[in-house]
Amino acid sequence: MRLRTKVLMLACLMLAGLGLVVGTACNEHELSPFANSLAAGAAEMNKDGATRAVDILFVVDDSNSMVEEQRGLNENFSAFLGQLVAVNADFQLAAISTTLLNGHGINEPNSSVSFNTELAQTFWGAGNLLDEDGREIDSTALREKCEKFFNLTKTTWLTSTLRYSYDKTEKAWKQGTESMNLDDIKDLFRCQGLTGTGGSAVERGLSTMIRSLNSNRRFKRSGSLLAVVFVTDENDCSSTMEDAVAANTYGDNQDATQECELKRNIEDSCVLSSGDRVKNGEVEPALGPTIDVGDSKVPLRKVCVDASAESRDALIKYYNDPESDAKEYINCPEGGCLNKLQTRRDFYDQIVEYVRVSNVGYYLKSQPSLKALDKEERKKKEEQMAVEDIIIASVINRDQGLRYNDENFPEKWCGAAGTQSYRYQLFAEMFNDPIYAPICCRREAFSTNVAGDQIETVCEANDNGSLAKFGPVLSKIGKRIGEAVASICTTKVPVTCIPEECNAGSPKCPCLRGCSDTQYFAGSEHAYNVCEEFKVVVGSIEGEDMSTLEIFKDGTDYTIDMESTFCRNRTDSPIQIKLNRNDAGRNLVYQYPQKITGK
């Protein structure tokens, strides 16, 4: 399933005033005769390819309220997997539970990723798990199939590049030349991702995430993207209190969850999301008033999401100011927010550092200019790049802007509000392009765009406690990961003019034929127009021989997104090339105008 096409980026720079070209086997007219007013981007070469491998970790709630939800995950996992297959993604896939055990990690016996038979029996026995055709799953045969696979391969996670098939008659795995059968992958994921319902009622998904990653650094490959998908109907209760971590003294009951809620952190107590608006399937969080953070004024929502020590100090000062309106936006339990939970910022810093260390060689190779920076500047830039290489998705009880105290703690998980998973949602918002979709529906409409203009409804507006449709949600998450894998973000900002300078004869925008009528990111701080002469050309070649160039068809072999937030967050360029074609054994080349010559 791996996308084997290496991507060779050859963009030629026409030196102004000279007829010279910098690059290898390339000039600006060999790929496409650009208009004379434009020259291509700076010369680049990336023999490792612009496509990225991705390592995916599912964190699945294994408490006793998750029977129906795990069934939904099981029945619709193919919607997620199908998006990865569509882009021939090179992926690894592991799963853990939200129960924090001593030494909980990907490759350890107590971890659900190592096919925990006891938990699987608990789930299948209690939930009467059915397959996609409504037939009861033979858990004994499935356990045997999974155990044989992991014993044979000596692995504790799935890898798309493994080449095995399962002979149902002989009940044996056989090594072959083809990639694994999709049905086999789905079966093996059942053994991992269906973590059971016998786990702790005090979910600590952020803790199990970071402990499992740190316990086995071989799972995250050098240079790969990292995606984490949380599936839970409860909040995160990762605590810094030694008794809770070491001895699990909260217990495994509703009272224990309430104890965690009442000792929540102040940065988790913002209720601004009560103003969330669902527009076109996306959530637009209200930002609230601005407050003082150091010498700056920052919207309250952003301060709460940031969760740094400086942000926490600012929130405490704001909350304790009798002249402020803090009580309207921050709901602390009686006695105040006790800040007994491990901060989201701690988990954020740990996972960013984990990815930075894993990918530092890739960063230095793909951007040699990093080597010229001093140590502190280089690390900061590497951290920024690491954040872009992390995808956080959550299928959760989305934040409805309620925070509970003694008298109003809910008894239901999926009711008018339920026990909201706001810690997971806020954690996702700490990264670019977060995904957080409902695990159940609570009186709100929620739709998602899963394929082109195809809109699928996840929740109807009058639903009150019913389960969400997992198919569209998982498909959206898979599509988001697939875009990161199979898309190319152009590395240079294209020829652009800010809207007010277009067609005005401004020396800052010397387009010979004027600007395009289309304004991208209209109405935002990123609004821009391109010159009429602008064009992106994509093709493939054998090795570096430009005489073998075959031009791709725009709209068929690839599509261009000129308003890609995904890419703008990563390379400052908003242009994203989405590949629909795989020329195995050939290199991909692309070219686009990046510098204006004015001639």
Image (cartoon, grey):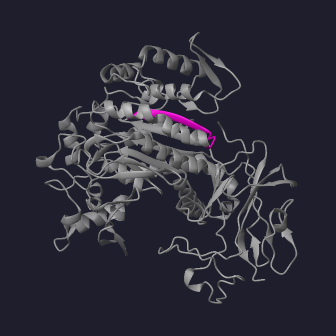
Is residue 264 in view?
yes
Residue 137 falls left or right of residue 3: left
In the rendered structure, does residue 302 fall within the stretch colored magenta? no
* Count of labels in the image: 0
* Residue located farthest toward the bottom when viewing the structure as drawn: 505
In the rendered structure, does residue 89 fall within the stretch colored magenta? yes
| Quarter of the N terminus within the rendering | top right
Q: Position of residue 382 (x, y in %)?
A: 58, 57
Asked whether 450 or 276 is in front, the reply is 450
Residue 345 occupies which quadrant of the picture? bottom left
Q: Main secondary structure of the magenta part?
A: strand
Task: Name the residue: 53% across, 35% down.
Answer: 93
Is residue 100 in view?
no
Residue 430 falls left or right of residue 81: left
Asked whether 581 or 2 is in front, the reply is 581
| Quarter of the C terminus within the rendering | bottom right
Provide the residue span drawn in magenta: 87-97
Task: Name the residue: 59% across, 65% down.
Answer: 562
Residue 481 falls left or right of residue 204: right
Q: Position of residue 169 (x, y in %)?
A: 58, 10
Task: Name the residue: 62% across, 39% down.
Answer: 90
Q: Position of residue 38 (x, y in %)?
A: 75, 75
